[in-house]
Amino acid sequence: MAESFSLEELSRQINAWCTEHEIAPASGQTGEVVSERNVRYYRTLGLIDAPDGGEYGEKHLLQLTAVRLLQAQGLPLRRIRELVYGRSLQELREIRRRGLMEAGRASAAVRVVMPVSEELWRAIPLNEDFLLMSRRGTPLTPLQREAVLQALRSVSPVRVTQETKPR
């Protein structure tokens, strides 16, 4: 028989899993723990399925696991819903497996786990104003990151003059 949880038990399970694997949402994105209220909210957003007869099961736990892994990588809930909605148990297990692999290799760059795609998009925060996207998941070295920031600082707004106006 499949394991089932009450809402309170589901919250405890996901929080224990996050603690065990040191998974936390990106700074300032959401609270450190998943409350019962969070679970209800995620349900209304379509991030997790409705409980079956008031009980939550493995799929709900895997959906919350995917949400937390993707939040830890800085993704907004809207994007997380696009990545998680309608996934099978097998796909959700794969998201968890890949997410834990990525979390184990985490560095200063934020890694984005794409559930079912050949592309591995990675969002790399440069500072509080800029975010760099990599289609193939290529991380930046600290030297590259600083070079990009330096380039952004050195570029002044383009002034449209008679010479630069399109004809």
Image: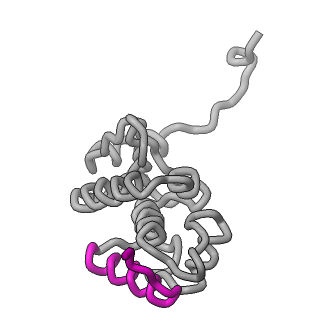
Tell me: residue 63, above or below residue 87: below
Q: Going by the image, does 158 lie left or right of 68? A: right
Residue found at x 34% / y 53%: 94
Dividing the picture into quadrants, the one containing residue 127 is: bottom left
* Residue 56 in magenta stretch: no
Residue nearer the viewer, 42 or 72: 42
Asked if residue 111 shows in the view, the reply is yes
Left/right of residue 119 with respect to residue 7 in the rendered view = left
* Quadrant assignment for the C terminus: top right
Q: Residue at x 52, y 75 (%)?
A: 30
Seen in the picture, residue 32 relative to 149 is either above or below; the reply is below
Q: Is residue 84 above or below residue 162?
A: below
Figure disc tally: 0
> Residue at left 46%, top 45%?
132
The residue drawn where x is 59% and y is 79% is: 53
Q: Specify start and end residues of the magenta stretch as a single range.
A: 1-21
Tell me if I can see residue 26 in this picture: no
**Can residue 7 be found in the magenta stretch?**
yes
Considering depth in this image, is 8 or 108 the residue closer to the camera?
8
